[in-house]
Amino acid sequence: MNFTLPSRAALQGLIVYAGFVLIFLFFSVMLWDRGFLSAQNLTNIVLQTAPATVLAVGLVFVLAAGEIDLSFGAAVALAAIVAAMVMRVYPWPIGVLAGMGTGMAVGLVNGAIVAYARLPSFLVTLATMGVVAGLARELSNLQSIPVTAEPFIAVFGGGRVFGIPSLVLWTMAALVIGHLIFRETRYGAHVLATGDNPRAALVSGIRVVRLRLSVMVLSGACAGLAGLLYAGRLQAARYTLGESDLMTVIAAVIVGGTALSGGRGTIPGALVGSLMMGMLSNGLILMGLSVSWQMIIKGLIVLVAVAVSLREPNR
């Protein structure tokens, strides 16, 4: 009988799921008397990771295309602030459009510079991260902007449909749509081909420039939605929203099996990675670890995940 060894991607996927189970079991044993396994705590983990999971969907497309976006955290705050300010004057659906439009506008600027000026996405989004964060602070005057529109809060925050929180429904919608586009459409195949070998993709007829632009806009759209979810859940928009998501989302996506060097990605893996990071944060808090130690542990996880992601055979 002939036995075929599993591919590297399959092995990494198994490691991710095994790691998720091991972390869950570890906290279940260590924190059994502190409510880790309570229904309320597990629900809180899912709700708290909802915006990060939405952001992870967009980042999968960006990384799989061989690019990176460091500005999505700042875009989250700006989108939430713009939406909250617009809802002070106009009906809440206009605020939703303004928030989504703001996120997409940030992605459009990033994508245009990366695609047409041919500058490295790392440097471009590092620069726009500072610009967008500054705009969020300037618009909000370093103050929290309350969100009082009850229909908006119900749709994007504390509402439920058939007992399922609206945050979970939005997250599920982003995951399902993202997975179908990534795996079942020509666009998803083009993203992977571009990330694997841009020159070969260009020769084969793929519009690489437009694709790079589009993945950045998609990331911005996810940032806009995440900003709306934050504003709905917290019933306020703050300039600090999304600040802590940068490392968490990058870690979730890479741990989930998306290659930092491009050419490989997985939406289900990003979900598992996001839940893993959320569970890790929750467990460390219940164990009494300080924020500084949480940052250290997350940073080490990112380092290990990047090392594993980059250790691939030469193409």
Image (spheres, rainbow, N blue to C red):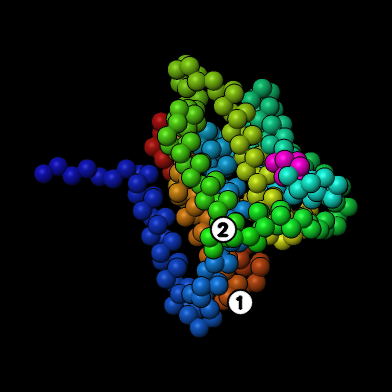
- Asked if 239 appears above or below 313 in the picture, the reply is below
- The amino acid at mark 2 is Val
Residue 37 is situated, as x and y percent measured from the top left of the image, at: 48, 75
At x 45% / y 27%, what residue is drawn? 186
Give the main secondary structure of the magenta stretch: helix
- The amino acid at mark 1 is Gly
Residue 20 is situated, as x and y percent measured from the top left of the image, at: 44, 61
- Residue 209 shows up from this direction: yes
Location of residue 128 by image quarter: top right
Outermost residue toward the front?
162
**Which span is picked out in magenta?**
94-100
- Asked if 292 appears above or below 204 in the picture, the reply is below
At x 50% / y 25%, what residue is drawn? 198
Quickly name the residue at label 1: 288
Left or right: 113 in relation to 52? right
- Asked if 202 appears above or below 244 in the picture, the reply is above
Is residue 139 within the magenta segment? no
Left or right: 250 in relation to 18? right
- Badge number at residue 161: 2
Left or right: 134 in relation to 303? right
**Secondary structure state at the residue bearing disc 1:** loop
Outermost residue toward the left?
1
Viewer-side residue, 79 vs 215: 79
**Secondary structure state at the residue bearing disc 2:** strand
Crowd class of label 2 (few under 14; some 14 to 19; many from 20; radius 10 Å): few
Measure the alpha-carbon separation of dots 1 and 2.
35 Å
The first of marks 1 and 2 along the sequence is 2
